[in-house]
Image (cartoon, rainbow, N blue to C red):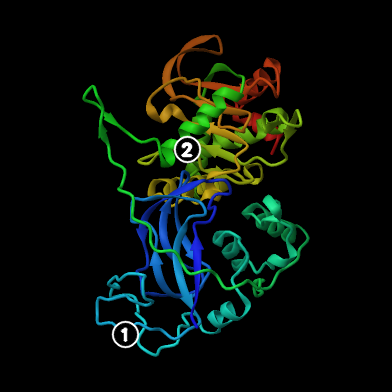
């Protein structure tokens, strides 16, 4: 007999609670392979294609495009390991009685009468014989498979030992440190009882629309990226006792140094990359600002690695992509990574992993034509460096009044992790490096 397996919306961001269906990639009646993307969803952090852990025939979809589903809600059901029963004419998708019909797109193969459901060769047969894979995020499973990592060797840090993306990434870094290589292996599978009959498709909720307000205005739902930002900033303001200090700096020499680097040939170095390199050098001197506060344990946790977030304004709202291990990158590597993440932010293809895990944020609000700001800290980080526009202004240089290229630097910090002396020392070091780039040579 056919075994109908239900695939539920997984936790795509290790903590996200819902996602909106943007575009279905399969129709009822389509044959799907194991780990084939079946739907594109928008979470509070990114646009994500969700792969299905089962191979077989799609028998039902739950939710229309524009519908918001909670994590754990059914996405699709898949019939695996049985002869197809689709004997309907073109345009009918009655694979199993009671699951509705849908016309399949021309680019996808439909199941024919008497055809064995095996979209992935022996993989589907193994799926039926051995049962479905454990409840692990498909993105985590795919990351492990692509890197040849055996999930049976890992101990999950999530609830009830759930293996998270962070567990896989940690294992891969550990393997690199010890010079070990890993070979692709078959993923562990768990024996399970046959599932109950799949539930009928629920009526689709209408897509959210702007509704008229009493005063003739409009109501804009706080959802997706906008909603996530609102929640995070509200939490930051509630929990973090922040303070801000600022200083004007003469950026003339920094701009000259960048021009000289780019004139020497090779990949161009961005200003943001130079500022990031200054940040990582400053954090090495003042590690208190690369930390987080654990209020339950009443501890300040200083972090070894600098995962540098940078604010990026997109059509979908403000996002903060994260450059991993920024302290280990030179200006050229930082430039390339900033460019890659910025393009992904522009196209809406950033992954949840690229939007989480930051330890310090660099905010270049000078691109908006403003000089200063008192930003809200990106919870649970402890500090954010703000950089205003760089413009010519009168300035006393070497005892003479001159026109120099000035910038306002500001540091917003969590007063629980340090006092004003430490924050001022950090900001002064950053300003010194901006004014005299040769200062950085001490830490290279």
Residue placed at 30% from the left, 48% from the top? 206
Residue 430 at x, y = what percent? Answer: 61, 26
* Residue 430 vertical position relative to residue 272 in the rendered view, above or below: above
Name the residue carrying label 2: 228
Residue 38 at x, y = what percent? Answer: 42, 65
Mark 2 and mark 1 in contact? Answer it, CB < 8 Å: no
Q: Nearer the viewer, residue 56 or 40?
A: 56
* Residue 291 vertical position relative to residue 4 in the rendered view, above or below: above
Residue placed at 71% from the left, 51% from the top? 157
Residue 256 in view in this figure: no
Name of the residue lying farthest toward the bottom: 114
Q: Marks 2 and 1, how far apart in space?
A: 46 Å
Q: Nearer the viewer, residue 54 or 142?
A: 54
The label on residue 87 is: 1
Within-10-Å neighbours for mark 2: few <14, some 14–19, many 20+: some
Within-10-Å neighbours for mark 1: few <14, some 14–19, many 20+: some
Q: Nearer the viewer, residue 2 or 151?
A: 2
Horizontal side of 208 relative to 2 (left or right) equals left
């Amino acid at each position: 007999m056919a075994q109908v397996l239900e695939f539920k919306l997984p936790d795509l961001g290790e903590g996200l609670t819902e996602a909106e269906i943007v575009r279905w990639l399969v129709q009822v009646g389509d044959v799907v392979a194991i780990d084939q993307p079946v739907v594109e969803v928008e979470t509070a952090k990114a646009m994500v294609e969700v792969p299905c852990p089962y191979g077989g025939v799609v028998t039902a979809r739950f939710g229309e495009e524009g519908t918001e589903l909670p994590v754990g809600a059914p996405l699709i059901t898949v019939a695996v390991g049985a002869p197809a029963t689709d004997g309907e004419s073109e345009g009918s998708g009655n694979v199993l009685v009671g699951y509705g019909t849908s016309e399949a797109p021309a680019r996808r193969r439909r199941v024919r009468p008497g055809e064995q459901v095996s979209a992935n060769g022996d993989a589907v047969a193994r799926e039926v014989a051995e049962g479905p894979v454990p409840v692990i995020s498909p993105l985590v499973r795919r990351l492990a498979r692509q890197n040849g990592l055996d999930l049976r060797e890992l101990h999950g840090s999530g609830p009830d030992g759930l293996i998270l993306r962070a567990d896989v990434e940690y294992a891969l870094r550990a393997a690199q440190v010890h010079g070990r290589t890993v070979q692709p292996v078959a993923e562990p599978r768990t024996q399970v009882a046959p599932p109950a009959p799949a539930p009928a498709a629920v009526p689709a909720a209408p897509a959210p629309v702007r509704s008229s307000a009493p005063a003739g205005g409009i109501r804009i739902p706080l959802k997706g990226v906008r909603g996530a930002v609102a929640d995070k900033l509200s939490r930051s303001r509630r929990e973090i006792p922040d303070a801000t200090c600022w200083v004007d700096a003469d950026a003339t020499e920094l701009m000259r140094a960048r021009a000289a680097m780019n004139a020497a040939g090779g990949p161009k170095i961005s200003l943001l990359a130079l500022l990031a390199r200054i940040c990582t050098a400053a954090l090495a001197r003042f590690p208190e600002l690369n930390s987080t506060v654990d209020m339950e344990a009443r501890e300040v946790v200083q972090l070894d690695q600098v995962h540098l977030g940078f604010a990026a304004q997109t059509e979908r709202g403000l996002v903060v992509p994260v450059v991993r291990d920024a302290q280990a990158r030179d200006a050229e590597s930082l430039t390339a990574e900033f460019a890659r993440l910025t393009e992904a932010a522009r196209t809406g293809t950033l992954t949840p992993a690229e939007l989480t895990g930051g330890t310090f944020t660099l905010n270049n609000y000078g691109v908006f034509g403003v000089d200063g700001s008192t930003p809200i800290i990106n919870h649970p980080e402890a500090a954010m460096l703000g950089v205003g526009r760089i413009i010519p202004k009168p300035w006393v240089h070497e005892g003479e009044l001159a026109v120099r290229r000035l910038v306002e630097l500001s540091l917003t910090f969590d007063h629980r992790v340090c006092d004003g002396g430490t924050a001022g020392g950090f900001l002064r070091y950053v300003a010194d490096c901006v004014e005299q780039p040769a200062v950085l040579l001490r830490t290279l």
